[in-house]
Image: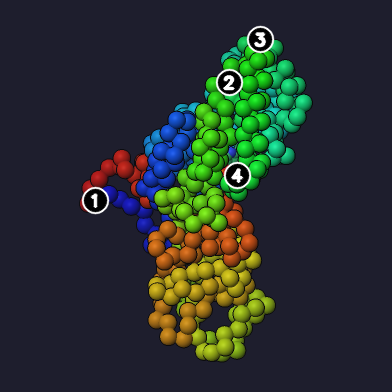
């Protein structure tokens, strides 16, 4: 028998379904069959757990991994992950030498970054791989307007010196979640124009890339040589306003055990500030998870929860470590019963439901999950190869 991790006695945990994760990677790869595939695993894999997610994504066919910060990239390499890996958000003084020596691709939006990368490459004694980032209209990272030509002209002598190679030209969308927005096409055209300019200057980029999850799913013309889906590999839609779920399956289910069940009389206010007051005698359950665990405090009175067959919502204030749910006067719930805040099974609330209830996006709901919440990996690559239980 395969050993599955147990949740016995845990107050709150997040189940990470690696079968769903692998399925989502395959669905997205089919959508962008001609392109290389970068699984974006920044921010602890959107809260799902960096290393196990990276390993499953690679096993399911991801050919690249992408992270925002250099320490995230180092964590992958230092754990033995050898997949092509890009990190894109560094500040002056970052450990570029550590990145070059670990064979990590870097991004540059400005000449200072190229200079620091070049110095690191000279020190390490091997050339760096750099993706030149162009701001095609997001107005955030990337070289904008005439700065693009400056960036390309700055890279060329460093290429000639042999200390770096501009292997990528890339950008990021402002409105990819609004498939019909006119900026989508304009940004795409600007990216390919910028890449052509770099080539005229002598660069030989291997990959031109711009597609996040939404573009991977709905804009085949933006796939370029490499797609960079994040949220969709976790089974959450980047375009929740569109009915289609694209065949994706949610990967994370957030569950807790009731720490206490008790009767309260009508009129007894619940939790700090008494923002919820039952109008009849009722049964309440105490959920041992709060804003320190990433439960939004503004889910007060609105966050959906299911306990057994009872679909209810947060009753009163979300506190640091706990909140209450109203289970109704006829509830037979017991301490220890499992409550699902969000999950993937039919009938369960979703991370998108929590996002809608708290006026945010599903990305924030999953990636803000606190360090105190154990991630329980089900069907992870390393489990699949684990020894049989001798008992
Ligand atoms: C986060 C991120 C992605 C992935 O975006 P999703 O909308 O989650 O698919 C892709 N590229 C860059 C540069 C990112 O920062």
Q: Is residue 378 placed above or below 136 in the rendered structure?
A: below
Give the residue at x 36% y 41%: 382
**Residue that numbered label 4 is attached to:** 176
Residue 85 position, x and y percent, is 53, 30
**Residue that numbered label 2 is attached to:** 205
For discs 3 and 2, the disc positioned in front in the rendered view: 2
For discs 4 and 1, the disc positioned in front in the rendered view: 4
Q: Spatial distance from mark 4 to mark 2, Cα to Cα? A: 24 Å
For discs 3 and 4, the disc positioned in front in the rendered view: 4
- Given residues 130 and 14, the one toward you in this image is 130
Label 4 beta carbon within 8 A of ligand 1: yes
Give the residue at x 63% y 21%: 196
Quadrant housing residue 241: bottom right
Disc 4 residue crowd, few under 14, some 14–19, many 20+, Cα 10 Å: many
Label 3 beta carbon within 8 A of ligand 1: no
Q: Is label 3 in a helix, a strand or a loop?
A: helix
Residue 67 position, x and y percent, is 57, 37
Disc 2 residue crowd, few under 14, some 14–19, many 20+, Cα 10 Å: some
**Residue that numbered label 3 is attached to:** 161
Marks 3/2 in contact by CB < 8 Å: the verdict is no
Numbered mark located on residue 372 in the image: none
Numbered mark located on residue 1 in the image: 1
Quadrant housing residue 155: top right
Disc on the earlier residue, 3 or 4: 3
Disc on the earlier residue, 2 or 1: 1
């Amino acid at each position: 028998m395969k050993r599955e991790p147990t949740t016995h006695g845990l107050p709150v945990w997040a189940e990470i379904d690696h079968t769903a994760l692998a399925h989502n990677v395959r669905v997205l790869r089919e959508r962008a069959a001609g392109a290389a595939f970068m699984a974006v695993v920044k921010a602890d894999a959107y809260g799902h757990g960096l290393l196990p997610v990276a390993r499953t994504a690679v096993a399911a066919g991801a050919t690249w991994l992408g992270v925002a910060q250099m320490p995230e990239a180092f964590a992958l390499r230092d754990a033995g992950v050898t997949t092509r890996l890009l990190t894109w958000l560094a500040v002056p003084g970052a450990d570029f030498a550590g990145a070059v020596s670990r064979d990590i691709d870097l991004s540059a939006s400005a000449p200072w970054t190229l200079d620091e990368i070049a110095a690191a490459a000279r020190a390490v004694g091997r050339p760096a791989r750099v993706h030149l980032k162009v701001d095609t209209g997001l107005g955030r990272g990337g070289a904008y307007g005439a700065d693009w030509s400056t960036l390309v002209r700055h890279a060329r002598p460093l290429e000639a010196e042999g200390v770096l190679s501009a292997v990528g030209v890339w950008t990021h969308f402002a409105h990819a979640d609004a498939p019909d927005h006119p900026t989508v096409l304009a940004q795409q055209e600007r990216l390919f124009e910028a890449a052509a300019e770099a080539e005229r200057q002598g660069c030989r980029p291997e990959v031109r890339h711009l597609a996040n999850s939404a573009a991977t799913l709905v804009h085949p013309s933006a796939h370029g040589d490499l797609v960079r889906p994040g949220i969709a590999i976790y089974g959450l839609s980047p375009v929740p306003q569109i009915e289609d779920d694209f065949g994706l399956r949610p990967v994370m289910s957030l569950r807790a055990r009731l720490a206490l069940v008790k009767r309260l009389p009508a009129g007894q206010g619940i939790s700090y500030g008494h923002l919820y007051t039952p109008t009849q005698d009722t049964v309440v359950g105490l959920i041992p998870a709060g804003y320190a665990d990433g439960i939004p405090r503004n889910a007060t009175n609105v966050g959906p929860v299911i306990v057994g067959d009872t679909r209810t919502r947060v009753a009163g204030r979300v506190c640091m470590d706990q909140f209450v749910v109203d289970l109704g006067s006829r509830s037979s719930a017991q301490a220890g019963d499992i409550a699902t805040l969000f999950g993937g099974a039919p009938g369960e609330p979703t991370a998108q439901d929590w996002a809608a209830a708290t006026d945010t996006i599903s990305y924030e709901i999953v990636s803000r999950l606190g360090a105190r919440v154990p991630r329980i990996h089900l069907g992870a690559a390393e489990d699949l190869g684990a020894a049989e239980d001798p008992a």
